[in-house]
Image (spheres, helix red, strand yellow):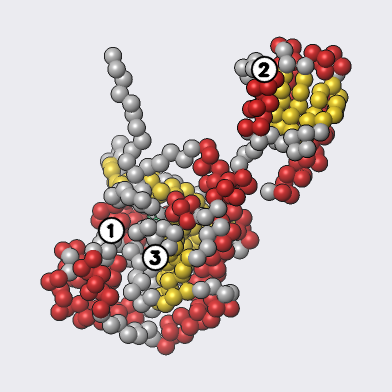
């Protein structure tokens, strides 16, 4: 009976080993950069109560209205695959009483997120984010810091030519003023807006600025918003721009930038890249000063960002440079000639591996030539050769693949030979 093939789900991807080492390298760079800025790693569950996102992202947001993967679990609870991690990190902050223990924290995360979107280039149903959240402060220096950290990460990944778009939604009063201004400006064109936006006009007017429908985009582009910020928010926004200029970060002020999630307050930003197609946002973030209290936590300020790994990989020009750095290139390949030598080689592997030296061997009794070919293929830095003669003499041949030089080493001195090599490889990484 013919067996049907099971394929991966639409909008998901297999990250195969060649590509996976690139992912690994990006995650390592991101983590190291975040650590340099004082952020600490947090891991939260992939499944959460659906209510967490309904309350944080907003009932009217696309994420909650159309994209959330929610389902009842065996106990009848309404749970979901997380569509983003900011709300999860805030839940964890509140649930673990971090406000009592530390108050202010800077956190870093990376992992898969899930949104039931129409799959297309750069838009997946399972995608991966790297993000940071600085929770417990209203300081504009933190808004500047997260943007600088993001810019630093992007440059270290090898992403260039990206643009930061920044805006300030202001305080609650300013936000109401912006909403009133948009409502007034859109009133004459109400019937020309898409059905979603006609609904949003009453339920969540800010979302209209986010609409991607061409007709809405034209109308939005024509409306004049002017300055709606109060003195204090205006000053905060000016300070941010000064701090970014001092850090030589190029940005463009975009008064249409409101972001698609309801929890944002104050400064928001998005980074786009011309290396991407229609889905050109590499990363986005901003301040969410009401989110913790909306989730029954303390009234404290917070800001952060998340970047999309798939889009970062698409935007990196020189992928090979990162791949070589990140590849788990075998350091030592052990070649055996004959059955007895193979057993000895297998033992050598165990000794080297216990010392943390990456190594492998041939398991198929292939010819010397075939084993050498394989050593080259896996990019081995060194080859250890053991045949009957070496076995009898209690030594092996060590070949340096860089200059093809070789010498004889006693078996018990072999691991020691790689101490200096290990240091050298680390420094080169
Ligand atoms: P977001 O704008 O929804 O923000 O997502 C951030 C980034 O994730 C996007 O700029 C994009 O690169 C990537 N992304 C989003 N959806 C997809 C998708 N379907 N396929 C591929 N990549 C995608 C947030 O998630 C907020 N939590 C960011 C934040 C953190 N704000 C404050 N702190």
Q: Quadrant of residue 377?
A: top right
Label 1 sits on residue: 62
Residues at marks 2 and 1, CA–CA distance in whole angstroms: 60 Å
Which residue appears at 15% of the width and 79% of the height? 188
Q: Position of residue 260 (x, y in %)?
A: 33, 64
Residue furthest to the bottom: 231
Residue nearest the observer in this picture, 295 or 251: 251
Disc sitting over residue 291 in the figure: 3
Above or below, 245 against 306 in this view is below
Label 3 Cα crowd, 10 Å radius (few <14 / some 14-19 / many 20+): many
Marks 1 and 3 close (CB-CB < 8 Å): no
In the drawing, does residue 104 fall left or right of residue 179? right
Q: Earlier in the sequence, mark 2 or mark 3?
A: 3
Q: Quadrant of residue 104?
A: bottom right
Q: Quadrant of the N terminus?
A: top left
Residue nearest the observer in this picture, 64 or 22: 22
Marks 2 and 1 close (CB-CB < 8 Å): no
Which residue appears at 34% of the width and 44% of the height? 11
Q: Position of residue 182 (x, y in %)?
A: 25, 78
Closer mark to the observer between disc 1 and disc 3: 1
Label 2 sits on residue: 367
- Badge 3 marks a residue whose secondary structure is helix
Closer mark to the observer between disc 2 and disc 3: 2
In the drawing, does residue 220 fall left or right of residue 111? left
Q: Earlier in the sequence, mark 1 or mark 3?
A: 1
- Badge 2 marks a residue whose secondary structure is loop
């Amino acid at each position: 009976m013919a067996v049907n093939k099971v394929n991966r789900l639409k909008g998901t991807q297999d990250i195969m080993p060649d590509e996976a080492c690139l992912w690994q390298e990006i995650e390592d760079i991101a983590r190291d950069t975040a650590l340099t800025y004082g952020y600490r790693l947090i891991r939260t569950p992939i499944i959460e109560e659906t209510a967490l996102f309904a309350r944080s992202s907003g009932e009217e947001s696309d994420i909650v209205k159309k994209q959330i993967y929610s389902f009842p679990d065996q106990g009848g609870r309404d749970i979901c695959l997380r569509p983003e991690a900011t709300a999860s990190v805030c839940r964890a902050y509140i649930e673990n009483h971090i406000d009592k223990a530390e108050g202010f924290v800077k956190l870093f995360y990376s992992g898969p997120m899930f949104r039931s979107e129409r799959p297309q280039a750069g838009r997946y149903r399972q995608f991966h984010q790297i993000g940071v959240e600085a929770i417990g402060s209203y300081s504009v220096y933190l808004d500047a810091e997260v943007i600088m950290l993001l810019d630093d990460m992007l440059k270290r990944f090898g992403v260039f030519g990206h643009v930061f778009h920044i805006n300030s939604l202001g305080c609650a009063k300013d936000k109401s003023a912006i909403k009133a201004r948009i409502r007034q400006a859109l009133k004459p064109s109400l019937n020309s807006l898409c059905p979603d936006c006609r609904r949003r006009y009453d339920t969540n007017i800010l979302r209209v600025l986010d609409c991607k429908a061409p007709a809405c985009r034209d109308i939005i582009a024509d409306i004049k918003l002017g300055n709606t910020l109060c003195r204090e928010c205006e000053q905060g926004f000016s300070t941010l721009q000064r701090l970014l200029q001092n850090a030589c970060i190029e940005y463009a002020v975009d008064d249409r930038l409101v972001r698609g999630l309801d929890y944002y307050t104050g400064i928001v930003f998005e980074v786009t890249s011309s290396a991407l197609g229609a889905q050109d946002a590499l990363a986005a973030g901003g301040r969410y000063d009401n989110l913790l209290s909306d989730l029954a936590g303390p009234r404290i300020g917070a800001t952060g960002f998340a970047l999309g790994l798939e889009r970062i990989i698409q935007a990196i020009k020189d992928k090979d440079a990162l791949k070589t750095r990140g590849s788990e290139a075998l350091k030592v390949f052990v070649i055996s000639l004959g059955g007895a030598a193979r057993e000895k080689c297998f033992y050598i592997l165990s000794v080297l591996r216990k010392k943390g030296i990456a190594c492998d061997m041939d398991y198929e009794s292939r010819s010397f030539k075939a084993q050498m070919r394989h050593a080259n293929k896996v990019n081995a830095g060194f080859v250890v050769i053991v045949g009957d003669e070496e076995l009898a003499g209690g030594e092996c041949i060590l070949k340096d693949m860089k200059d093809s030089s070789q010498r004889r080493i006693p078996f018990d001195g072999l691991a020691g030979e790689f101490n200096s090599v290990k240091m050298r490889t680390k420094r080169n990484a």
